[in-house]
Image: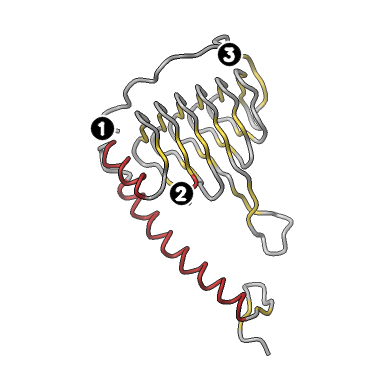
């Protein structure tokens, strides 16, 4: 008779059970860290939040800012280049890698998911893929990026779009699921985004 069973009732060896116990403890610690980041994410100081996020493992380039209310699943998987701005109440998954380039403007309430449930798995387990957002991309408000996509340099994602596949450089996409609706005329961007809102 097995001492340990998983949530599906499958027998577990002592080694498997030990691994799951360690994983559960790690997730409790991570959940507490995410609570601290959530509360600290409402402090109206960019420098305080940058220090808090940097301490949690987010790699943030010079001049980049994250507005208030940002949420995370695992901050250690997130890299942000220089002079990029993340809008308020964004969600960055981080369980797989998220790489955000330089001079990227991500508007309010954007959700970036790099993991999801495998709906065909008996355990309903996670599956996912890294997300790459290249330089000079603009992502409009309330966009959802799903696992494994790359947003090419200079691309624009219109407000409310759901991105399920790669977006070509300098293209403009919108809709659910996102499809090409135009092309950006600016092919050699060199602008800087400027300062973020002081108390946001």
Residue underneath mark 2: 76
Q: Is residue 62 left or right of residue 104?
A: left
**Quarter containing the N terminus:** bottom right
Of 181 and 83, nearer the camera is: 83
* Secondary structure state at the residue bearing disc 1: loop
Q: Can you tell which of label 1 and label 3 is closer to the viewer?
A: 3
Of 135 and 109, nearer the camera is: 135
Residue underneath mark 1: 199
Dividing the picture into quadrants, the one containing residue 186 is top right
Q: Is residue 167 left or right of residue 156?
A: right
Q: Can you tell which of label 1 and label 2 is closer to the viewer?
A: 2
Find the distance from the CA under tag 2 to the CA under tag 3. Answer: 33 Å
Residue underneath mark 3: 184
Q: Residue at x 63, y 36 (%)?
A: 149
Q: Which mark is residue 3?
A: none
Q: Earlier in the sequence, mark 2 or mark 3?
A: 2
Q: Earlier in the sequence, mark 1 or mark 2?
A: 2
**Rendering coords of residue 138 (x, y %):** 50, 24
**Quarter containing the C terminus:** top left
Dividing the picture into quadrants, the one containing residue 198 is top left
| Residue density around tag 1, few if under 14, some if 14–19, many if 20 or more, within 10 Å | few
Find the distance from the CA under tag 1 to the CA under tag 3. Answer: 32 Å
**Rendering coords of residue 146 (x, y %):** 61, 40
* Secondary structure state at the residue bearing disc 3: loop
């Amino acid at each position: 008779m097995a001492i340990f069973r998983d949530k599906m009732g499958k027998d577990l060896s002592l080694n498997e059970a030990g691994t799951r116990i360690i994983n559960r403890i790690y997730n409790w610690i991570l959940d507490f860290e995410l609570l601290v980041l959530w509360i600290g994410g409402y402090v109206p100081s960019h420098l305080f939040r940058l220090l808090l996020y940097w301490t949690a493992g987010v790699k943030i380039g010079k001049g980049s800012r994250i507005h208030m209310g940002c949420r995370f699943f695992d901050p250690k998987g997130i890299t942000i280049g220089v002079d990029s701005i993340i809008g308020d109440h964004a969600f960055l998954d981080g369980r797989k890698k998220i790489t955000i380039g330089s001079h990227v403007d991500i508007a309010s309430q954007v959700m970036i998911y790099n993991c999801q449930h495998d709906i065909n798995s008996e355990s309903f387990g996670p599956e996912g893929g890294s997300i790459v957002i290249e330089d000079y991309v603009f992502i409009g408000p309330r966009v959802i990026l799903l696992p494994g996509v790359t947003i090419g340099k200079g691309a624009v994602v219109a407000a409310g779009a759901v991105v399920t596949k790669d977006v070509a450089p300098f293209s403009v996409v919108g809709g659910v699921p996102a499809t090409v609706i135009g092309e950006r005329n600016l092919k050699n961007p060199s602008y800087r985004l400027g300062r973020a809102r002081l108390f946001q």
